[in-house]
Amino acid sequence: MEKDKSGKAMRATILVVGTLIALAMAYGSGLGQGNRAARKARDARDAAEVKLSMARTEVSARDAILRQLEARRQMHLALLALDDRNFGIAQQHLSGAANLLSTGANASLAGQIKAVSIVAAGDMGQQRQQILDFTRQLDSSLTLPPDLAAPVAPGTAP
């Protein structure tokens, strides 16, 4: 009888230990899967942060291009105002162009533009030429990414 009790106790102990081992294995397996899911989530977050950083850089670059193009437009409007003998308006457009260019790679050009004072004159050729020179300087420094550049027709110079 004692042997029978001892055998039952042994079986109960083996059953309890086996159950505990099975529970520990199940817990470890779930923990491992949770770690994998957390690692995947961290990797996805890191990839999203890299994409966000790249997008911010792209937006910043495109903003700089936009500012240059708007400055170019302001100089063109200054030329049109000068042709119409609207000297004050021409000066305003030049000031606008200079403000747009004051930060970034064209800051020295902005300083040159700011130094110009449009005055009423009978012969506006010199003032007009000066604005055209500024426009050409800006054009030579402006590089558009391929997706923004105008297509060039076959047989024409770019």
Image (cartoon, rainbow, N blue to C red):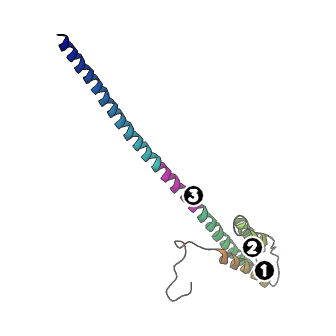
Q: Residue at x 77, y 72 (%)?
A: 113
Q: Residue at x 72, y 74 (%)?
A: 78
Tell me which numbered mark, 2 or 3, is placed earlier along the sequence. 3
The residue under label 1 is which amino acid type?
Gln
In this picture, which residue range is highlighted in magenta? 45-59
Towards the viewer: 51 or 86: 51
Q: Position of residue 61 (x, y in %)?
A: 60, 64
Q: Secondary structure at mark 3?
A: helix
Specify the quadrant that holds the N terminus: top left
Write down the quadrant of residue 11 in the picture: top left
- Residue for badge 1: 127
Q: Nearer the viewer, mark 2 or mark 3?
A: 3
Above or below for 46 versus 97: above
State left or right for residue 117 relative to residue 68: right
- Residue for badge 3: 56
- Residue for badge 2: 90
Task: Please report contact status of discs 2 and 1: CB closer than 8 Å, yes or no.
Answer: no
Towards the viewer: 85 or 30: 30
Q: Residues within 10 Å of mark 2 (few under 14, many from 20)?
A: many
Write down the quadrant of residue 122 in the picture: bottom right
Q: Secondary structure at mark 2?
A: helix
The residue under label 2 is which amino acid type?
Ala
* Residue 48 magenta: yes
State left or right for residue 1 relative to residue 65: left
Q: Position of residue 3 (x, y in %)?
A: 19, 13
Q: Position of residue 49 (x, y in %)?
A: 52, 52
Q: Residues within 10 Å of mark 1 (few under 14, many from 20)?
A: some
Q: Residue at x 40, y 44 (%)?
A: 36
CA gap, disc 2 and disc 3: 35 Å
Q: Nearer the viewer, mark 2 or mark 1?
A: 1
Q: Secondary structure at mark 1?
A: helix
CA gap, disc 3 and disc 1: 39 Å
